[in-house]
Amino acid sequence: MAELATIARPYAEALFQVASQGDLKPAVEQLDAVAATAADPQLRSFADRPKANAQEVFDVIAGVVKAPLADSVRNLLATVIDNGRLAALPEIALQFRALVNERSGVSDATVYSAFPIDAAQMDSVLGALEKRFGRMLNARVEVEPALIGGIRVVVGDEVLDTSVKARLEQMKAALTA
């Protein structure tokens, strides 16, 4: 079977072509919500039943997503379900987001922090990170207590780790060398 990334690419590109004629932000949000719903194991069990038809699966996913879906996202969802590619929906959302980010010159960033970060702190951190990475960032925060303190930032394949855990590991490596 082909890799999910290979399967997802044409769907993401097609949605991007259609959605780029309007505002892309709602399409990104709606597709993320649909993809998160499609990734749910209970939904996947329901969709994989032999007696489940495409319309039932579509109705369940559209019903779980609270906001009304744009025609482009509805059409994509129906096509993915009809073609038996529901498993590829999370990857489609990732590739679509990458296309949108590339067009707007923004990169997604995940900030891992030992503690929750409030809005004022995040604005300050985001400003410094945008200088460091040389581009606009769309950041989301995940709390990871194992870091002990500090943050670890992942932007694409770049990682900036200023956590206490990383520094302790560096000291351990230096002492055992």
Image (cartoon, rainbow, N blue to C red):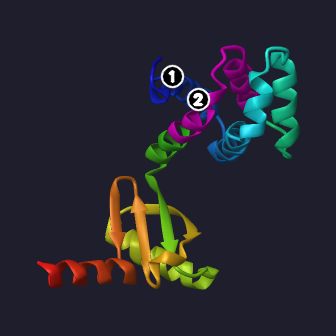
The quadrant of the image that shows the C terminus is bottom left
Q: Quadrant of residue 131?
A: bottom left
User: Residue 14's spot in the image, x, y percent?
Assistant: 57, 24
Using the image, determine if residue 93 lies above or below residue 81: below
Residue 7, label in figure = 1
Farthest-out residue, left: 177
Question: Closer to the camera, 141 or 165?
Answer: 165
Residue 68, label in figure = none
User: Residue 30's spot in the image, x, y percent?
Assistant: 72, 42
- How many C-alpha atoms fall within 10 Å of the one at disc 1: few (<14), some, or many (≥20)? some
Q: Amino acid at mark 2?
A: Ala
- Please indicate whether residue 32 sits to the left or right of residue 144 in the image: right
Q: Residue at x 49, y 69 (%)?
A: 111
Using the image, determine if residue 7 lies above or below residue 177: above
Q: Amino acid at mark 1?
A: Ile
* Residue pointed to by mark 2: 88
The magenta region covers: 71-95
Labels 2 and 1 touching (C-beta < 8 A): yes
Using the image, determine if residue 79 lies above or below residue 157: above
Q: Residue at x 33, y 71 (%)?
A: 132
Q: Quadrant of residue 53?
A: top right
Q: Is residue 137 magenta?
A: no
Q: Quadrant of residue 78?
A: top right
